[in-house]
Every structure is written in C-alpha cells, then in structure tokens.
Amino acid sequence: MLYLQNNNNYMDSFELNKIIAAILMVALLVIGLGKIADGVFHVDKPENPGYKVEVEGQLASTTSQVTEVEQKVDIAAIMALGDVTSGEKIFKKCAACHSINKGGKNKIGPALYNVVGRAVGGVDNYKYSKALSSYGKEWSFEELNGFLKKPASYLKGTKMSYAGLRKEKDRASVIKYLNQSSDSPKQLP
C-alpha cells in the first residue's frame, strides 16, 4: 500500500509537469508567431511622424484675434444667469474670510461691503498684496467675474488662496449679491 501511495505522488507531479510544459509551449508559440509576423509584415516608420500643414502668413494675426475674443466676456449674458438668493448662499463660503455687512471689519480678507465699483485694493486699513494694490482698476462686473473664476491665475501674486468658482451661474449670483450689499448698487449690465 505504501508503494501505491508513492506511485500516485509520482503520477501527480508528472501530470503537473505536463500542464506546466503545455503552458510554456503555448507561450513560446505565441512569441514565435509574433516574431514571424513582424518579419513577414514589416512596416517602416516615417522619419517625421504626423502631417505638415501649409498655413498662409495670417497665422499670427488670427491667433491674436482669437485671444482678444476669448478675453472679452459677454458679462450681460453671464449676469443674467445669477440670482441674489443663490449668491447669498454661495457667499457663505466667503464669509470665513470676508465680511459683507455695512461697517463690517476686515478679516483675513478685506470687508466687501460697497465692493462693486470700488478701486481694487481700495480698503484703507487692509494690507493688500502688491498685485492687488498696484492693479489700478476698479471692481467692475467683468473684473469680479474674472477674479472669482480663479483668483491666483487672474492676478498673479494675490494672497487670496481660494480656488475660485467654476460655474458662471455661481459667479454671477455672488456678484449680484455683492452688488446688492452696497449703499448704491450699480446698474446690472
């Protein structure tokens, strides 16, 4: 009986070896067929991949016109998307750093009451970054829209680390809320 048991172990390992050998043979066959196919169906790669497109000399002027068009924003259409109620809700994210009440104090950021139409960097008792204090414009609807989209890329060097509001509707709502929070709100575009 002991002899039969050893014989079964011998047979089991022999069967296992056959299975492993079959797997290796299939792998070698696949690799070999791949090499043969590469030799039979050889394709030369081009020296310069891609296509050369001939363009007339107006490329530079067209590019500058496209950039100019992208920079101009239809602020009236954007402002039509927003509403003051949503702006008040969205502004709660801003309230951690900014006050919006009349006579409100500066926090991490300046007080934003009367901000629409005010000079950028125009709060006297707040220390602005050099980028904001030397900007030389006022907070128009267009300026606020651009700044709120992504402050760090709109004005390089600003201290404001807020990521921005991607959605036009959200930016328009916040701008409408900021405009309403004023002694004399500006007329919407």
Image (spheres, rainbow, N blue to C red):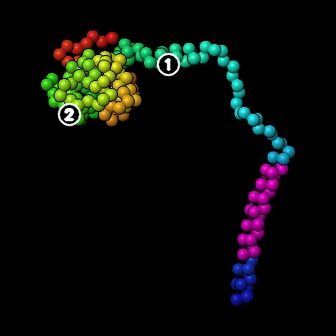
Which disc, if any, is residue 143?
A: none
Disc 2 to disc 1, how far (Cα)? Answer: 37 Å
Q: Which residues are magenta?
A: 12-36
Which image quadrant is residue 112 in?
top left
Which image quadrant is residue 45 in?
top right
Amino acid, disc 1: Thr
Quadrant for the N terminus in the image: bottom right
Which sits in the foreground, 172 or 145?
A: 145
Q: Residues within 10 Å of mark 2 (few under 14, many from 20)?
A: few
- Whether residue 172 is visible to the viewer of this picture, yes or no, is no
Residue at 80% in and 57% down: 29
Q: Which residue is mark 1?
A: 67
**Residue 135 in the image, given as x and y percentages of width and height:** 32, 22
Q: Is residue 21 magenta?
A: yes
Q: Residues within 10 Å of mark 1 (few under 14, many from 20)?
A: few
Helix or strand or loop: what does disc 2 sit on? Answer: loop
Marks 2 and 1: CB-CB under 8 Å? Answer: no
Q: Is residue 29 magenta?
A: yes
Q: Is residue 26 left or right of residue 107?
A: right
Residue at the outermost left position = 103
Residue at 73% in and 67% down: 20
Q: Earlier in the sequence, mark 2 or mark 1?
A: 1
- Whether residue 44 is visible to the viewer of this picture, yes or no, is yes
Quadrant for the C terminus in the image: top left
Image: 1 above or below 115:
below
Q: Which residue is mark 2?
A: 107
Which image quadrant is residue 178 in?
top left
Residue at 74% in and 83% down: 7
Helix or strand or loop: what does disc 1 sit on? Answer: helix
Residue at 74% in and 80% down: 10
